[in-house]
Amino acid sequence: MLDISNVIAAFSEDQVSNLTQLSIGRLRYWAKTGFFAPSYVADGKGPYGKFYSFKDVVALRTLEMLRVRNGVPLQHLRRVAEILAHLKDDLWTDTKLRVWDRKV
C-alpha cells in the first residue's frame, strides 16, 4: 500500500487556475489585496515563489462558485470572511454556506 502521508501537495498558479476556473490575474489580485493568499510563499517573487495547498484549491473552488456562478460580490465575500474569521482555514472548506439573492 502506498503511504501518502508525507507527500506535500503543492499547486502552481497555472494548475490552480485550471482546477478552479479562476484566472491567474484574479488569483494574484486576491493575494495582493489579502483576500486569499497561497499557503506556501517561498520568496514572494515570480510565478514560482507561490504555491497553493490542496485545501487552498478546495477553498478557491468554493469561492469561484460563490463569486462567479452565484454572482456574490467580492465586497460581500470580504465581509463574510471578516465575520467568520474565527473559523480560520476552515472558513471556505468545512463550512456549509447558502446563497440567497446574491448574499451568503
Image (cartoon, rainbow, N blue to C red):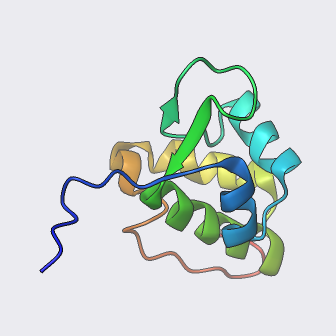
The picture places residue 13, in percent across and down from the top left corner, at: 70, 49
Residue 48 lies left or right of residue 4; in this view the side is right
Asked whether 56 or 84 is in front, the reply is 56
User: Would you place residue 100 above or below residue 31 in this image?
Assistant: below
Residue 87 lies left or right of residue 82; in this view the side is left
User: Would you place residue 29 above or below residue 22 in this image?
Assistant: above
The structure residue drawn at horizontal position 18% and vertical position 60%, both measured from the top left corner, is: 5
The structure residue drawn at horizontal position 70% and vertical position 76%, both measured from the top left corner, is: 65
User: Would you place residue 104 above or below residue 69 in this image?
Assistant: above
Does residue 71 appear in the picture of this structure?
A: no
Residue 103 lies left or right of residue 51; in this view the side is right
- Examine the image and state in which quarter residue 76 appears: bottom right
Asked whether 79 or 43 is in front, the reply is 43
The picture places residue 71, in percent across and down from the top left corner, at: 83, 73
Residue furthest toward the front?
1
Residue 9 lies left or right of residue 73; in this view the side is left
The picture places residue 12, in percent across and down from the top left corner, at: 64, 49
Residue furthest toward the left?
1
The structure residue drawn at horizontal position 69% and vertical position 35%, both measured from the top left corner, is: 31
Asked whether 6 or 51 is in front, the reply is 6
Does residue 2 appear in the picture of this structure?
A: yes
The structure residue drawn at horizontal position 85% and vertical position 57%, both measured from the top left corner, is: 23
Asked whether 66 or 18 is in front, the reply is 18
User: Would you place residue 103 above or below residue 43 in this image?
Assistant: below
Q: Quadrant of the N terminus?
A: bottom left
Q: How many marks?
A: 0
